[in-house]
Image: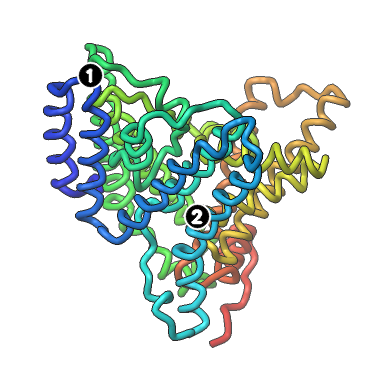
Amino acid sequence: MIQSWTFWAVAVCACSVFWVLPVRMRAGFLALVSIGYLATLDAFSVAALAALATLFYVCAPLLAEGRPQRHRALIALILVAALFLGAFKYLPPLLRALSVASPIAMLLIPLGISYYCFKLIHFAIEASRGTLERGRIDTFFLYLFLFPIFTAGPIERYDHFVANRVDRLDREDLVQGLHRVVVGLIKQAVIADLLLRVLVQSVPDNDVLLERLPELSTPLTWLIVARNYLHVYISFSAYSDIAIGISRLFGLRIQENFNWPVFARSASDYWQRWHMTLSRWCQDYVYLPALGHTRNPYLALQMSFFVMGMWHAGTATRLLWGMYHATAVGLYTAWTRLRRRRKWNFLTQRYGFVAAIALTQLYVLGSWAILTGEDTGGVYQGLRVLAKLLFLNLAPPSM
């Protein structure tokens, strides 16, 4: 959205009006502006998501402590959100892949549906725990539809959203908000679009990579995968900067989503820095409940990264990607226990940190190699690229 002049026009005009309005009218105004703007992009999606939001808001009192049907209501709402996500995001591509003639196969994925459904599930679970109240309907709809963060996050928490609003825009909020917007624009325009795309034109794109993989050298393959990784990281973090900056200009202090993952020292540390709101969501609502039921941290890890993979896309490539990350985090956890038991401290030295960062980024690039064929070749193509990074050549898929 940030490439559209309409987005910026809406942001500027809405911010100008927002602070003139009485405090009690601001949330409703910004919610209506957000819904209206998003409806210009995809009216059907917004209508469907608004209906789902209304259901959750109306049913929220059923989740209150002391209600006899509280647990059943929670399970029902989670299933509704999961089925809604599955019906729109996973079923149409599956039907198209199977060449099944059905109107469902023609449905488009609603804007921001994964972020939206995960926020609803968070709301339902925390409401059932008594850690938050549903509040006013205008605040609830603003939380779900706030247009700067709607399509690409962060996955804001409702309690954090409500607790970190201000009624008066002070100088710090104005400066910090504008600063984040400028930083995001520089990241996108200068680093992602100029340095990584224009200045690295000599590096083949993914289609050329997959077509000519046996001819390419392993160092060049590493370079292509690294370019892909850095481009997505810079673009994604740039969007997060802009979303957080614009939200702050409305007095809304949104959660951070990135913390320099390129300097992560381990697989575990990487997921505490990359898409932090997603990893925290999975930790709270998948890993910890799974750990409590199974008492098996490695199984809980696999379940968490399975959800992460499905959150991105319901493809075999993403499922393999999730297993790859879960295995790496599990191996690192086992290694940490061994290192502490043997009292090995060489990785705490200066050069040990450098080696840890380098090894972590190599591991991360392996996951991006798997994703190379996600749109054009599937799992096997991704495995071919991963093998190439290890100086191995797998035969191209048969026609």
Q: In front here: 20 or 234?
A: 20
Give the residue drawn at x 46%, y 78%.
96
Q: Nearer the viewer, residue 227 or 157?
A: 157
Image location (x, y in percent) of residue 341: 87, 26
Q: Which mark is residue 174?
A: 1
Q: Please state which amino acid type lies under the numbered disc 2.
A: His
Whether residue 107 is visible to the viewer of this picture, yes or no, is yes
Horizontal side of 124 relative to 92 (left or right) equals: right
Helix, strand or loop at label 2? It is helix
Disc tally is 2
Q: Residue at x 31, y 54 (%)?
A: 46
* Residue 30 location (% of width, % of height): 23, 34
Estimate the x, y position of residue 390 in percent, counting from the top left: 64, 58
Q: Identity of the amino acid at label 1?
A: Leu
Question: Where does label 2 land, which residue?
Answer: 312
Q: Position of residue 37 (x, y in %)?
A: 20, 47
